[in-house]
Image: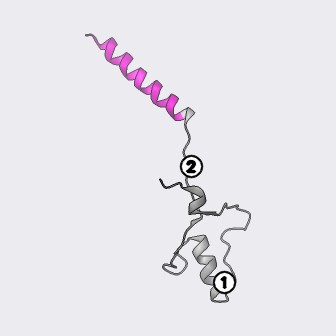
């Protein structure tokens, strides 16, 4: 078996990996809430829990950045099916 077989096998592996990458997608779920959702360290960066804690304490809600970013809020049961 000469070096040509190794080279072709490596090219094939790279091609199939790139094809898989191009035709699949992954999604990162953010801003997902559930019950109970205990507040953690103050201002830990979780939008939902921060909003709830600030609202319960009568504080103004903190919006990070310039306010132009968008978020999609989702309850965990609407995102994940448990069988």
**Residue 69 coordinates in the image, percent (x, y):** 70, 62
Q: Residue at x 56, y 70 (%)?
A: 46
Q: Are marks 1 and 2 in contact (CB under 8 Å)?
A: no
Q: Secondary structure at mark 1?
A: helix
User: Quadrant of residue 43 in the image?
Assistant: bottom right
For this orientation, the residue located farthest to the front is 83
**Residue 42 coordinates in the image, percent (x, y):** 53, 81
In the figure, is residue 19 to the left or right of 2?
Answer: right
**Residue 31 coordinates in the image, percent (x, y):** 60, 64
- Main secondary-structure element of the magenta-colored stretch: helix
Instruction: Indicate which disc residue 27 carries.
Output: 2
How many neighbours does mark 1 have within 10 angstroms: few (below 14), some (14-19), or many (20 or more)?
Answer: few
Instruction: Indicate which disc residue 65 carries.
Output: none
- Foreground residue among 38 and 30: 38
- Foreground residue among 58 and 62: 58
Looking at the figure, which quarter contains the N terminus? top left
Indicate whether 14 appears above or below 36. above
In the figure, is residue 81 to the left or right of 58?
Answer: left
In three-dimensional space, the C-alpha distance between marks 1 and 2, rounded to whole angstroms, equals: 30 Å
Magenta highlight range: 1-21
Q: Residue at x 74, y 63 (%)?
A: 68
User: Quadrant of residue 71 in the image?
Assistant: bottom right
User: Quadrant of residue 49 in the image?
Assistant: bottom right
Q: Residue at x 56, y 41 (%)?
A: 25
Display colour scheme: one colour
Verify whether residue 3 appears in magenta: yes
Mark closest to the chain's N terminus, 1 or 2: 2
Instruction: Indicate which disc residue 55 carries.
Output: 1
């Amino acid at each position: 078996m000469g070096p040509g077989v190794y080279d072709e096998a490596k090219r094939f592996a790279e091609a199939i990996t790139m094809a898989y990458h191009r035709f699949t997608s992954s999604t990162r779920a953010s801003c997902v809430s559930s019950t109970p959702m205990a507040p953690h360290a103050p201002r830990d960066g979780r939008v939902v829990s921060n909003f709830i804690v600030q609202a319960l304490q009568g504080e103004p809600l903190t919006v990070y950045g310039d306010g132009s970013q968008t978020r999609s809020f989702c309850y965990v049961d609407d995102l994940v099916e448990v069988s």
